[in-house]
Image (cartoon, helix red, strand yellow):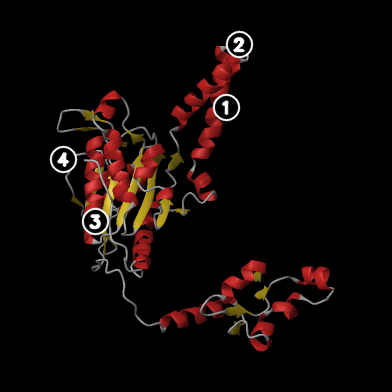
Amino acid sequence: MGSCVAGGAYLPILSDEALIVDKTGSVFLAGSYLVKAAVGEEVDNETLGGATTHCEISGVTDNKYPDDKACLEAIRNIFDKMGERPNAGFSRVTPQPPKHNPEEIYGLLPVDRVKPYNMLDIIGRLTDNSEFDEYKKDYGQTLLCGLARMDGWAVGIVANQRKVVKSGRKEMQMGGVIYSDSADKAARFIMNCNQKRIPLLFMQDVSGFMVGSRAEHGGIIKDGAKMVNAMSNSVVPKFTLLVGNSYGAGNYAMCGKAYDPRLIFAWPTAQLAVMSGASAAKTLLQIQVASLKAKGEVVTPEAEKELLDKITRRYEEQLSPYYAAARLWVDGIIDPLQTRRMISMGIEAANHAPIEKPYSVGVIQT
């Protein structure tokens, strides 16, 4: 449909079918200007490597079409006649819309992202019939794990619970934080989904793992590593949705970009960073103030506040999902109402690739 030059000229010709649009498509190793500079030949791009040249003279391309629409229709006709191949066998039934109105999602997320909300309310507006078969619902409650269907496809959901919960040990646990018990639960659930060949959907609104002496003594590193191990070695397709916060190691454990989800989308409400804007700004401020003091400079409270505001503004800009999308850290920013369709399309595409690798996590500390 357009120009394919130099190394890019090989890519379409390595394909099974090579279609070209007349007058706009061209394929050549060097364009007319480079040809003149290199060998002194004067020739226009259409004669050098246009649709007529490659369909009638060189045989490089198969067929030419008058416009993009005709070319796309020809591609559809090719796919329409392709034979069936074995698929991955993911479960799908007749799709059902959610019982709860999906448009209510717009009013469920608080404007202040530190305020709690119930992630189950979000899930209930995305799944078929608003059904969610929760796994170990009374254990590790800061992570929600369970089976559901989206547009008919079976899916295993791992989502951050954002409301404050009380554990079975009568401890208060902050929403959006991964604790040892929730990481342990998620690891087992992820392994179950791999055994049952159920695609995984990670819904992120995560601040990170719990820190402090109590968490360390409880084995947070061991349990967190178990979750990351189970997730990263998954052979079923993984999809990631950034609903709200996506900070630090929580991003990794919840199948961030580094762990190769098939698709990773963000809602406009998402934020993606090593840590929250407030925490990062205060940390960077301490580093810069210490550096200035080491040089013998006096930092007044006014100057410190001005420096903090400057750091905060710069960091907040980089938290934006649009900043992340511009750098391909996410595949796209979608309206919450598009979520079901996008996940369905992703699973449908993944279903054409049979799972060939066995699921193995190696040695896991328990």
Q: Nearer the viewer, mark 3 or mark 2?
A: 3
Quarter that holds the N terminus = bottom right
In the picture provided, is 255 more to the left or to the right than 48? left
Res 57 label: none
340 left or right of 46?
A: left
In the rendered structure, the answer to whether residue 54 lies left or right of residue 82 reads right
- The label shown at residue 193 is 3
Q: How far apart are the two marked residues, 2 and 1, measured between alpha carbons?
A: 18 Å
Q: Residues within 10 Å of mark 3 (few under 14, many from 20)?
A: many
Front in this rendered view, residue 128 or 65: 65
Q: Quadrant of residue 50?
A: bottom right
Closer to the chain start, of discs 4 and 3, is 4
Query: Is residue 62 rendered to the left or right of residue 270?
Result: right
Q: Residue 62 at x, y = what percent? A: 58, 84
Three-letter amino acid code at the position of disc 2: Val
Q: CA distance from mark 1 to mark 3?
A: 46 Å
Q: Secondary structure at mark 2?
A: loop
Disc 4 residue type (three-letter): Asp
- Label 3 or label 2, whichever comes before in sequence order: 3
Q: Amino acid at mark 1?
A: Lys
Q: CA distance from mark 1 to mark 4?
A: 44 Å
For the question of whether residue 147 can be seen, the reply is no
In the picture of the structure, the residue carrying the numbered disc 1 is 310
Q: Which residue is drawn at the image coordinates 21% and 39% (left, top)?
A: 140
Sequence-wise, the earlier of marks 2 and 1 is 2
Residue for badge 2:
298
Report the mark closest to the observer, 2 or 1. 2
Q: For marks 1 and 3, give the one nearer the viewer.
A: 3
Asked if the residue under mark 4 is in contact with the one under mark 1, i.e. CB atoms within 8 Å, the reply is no
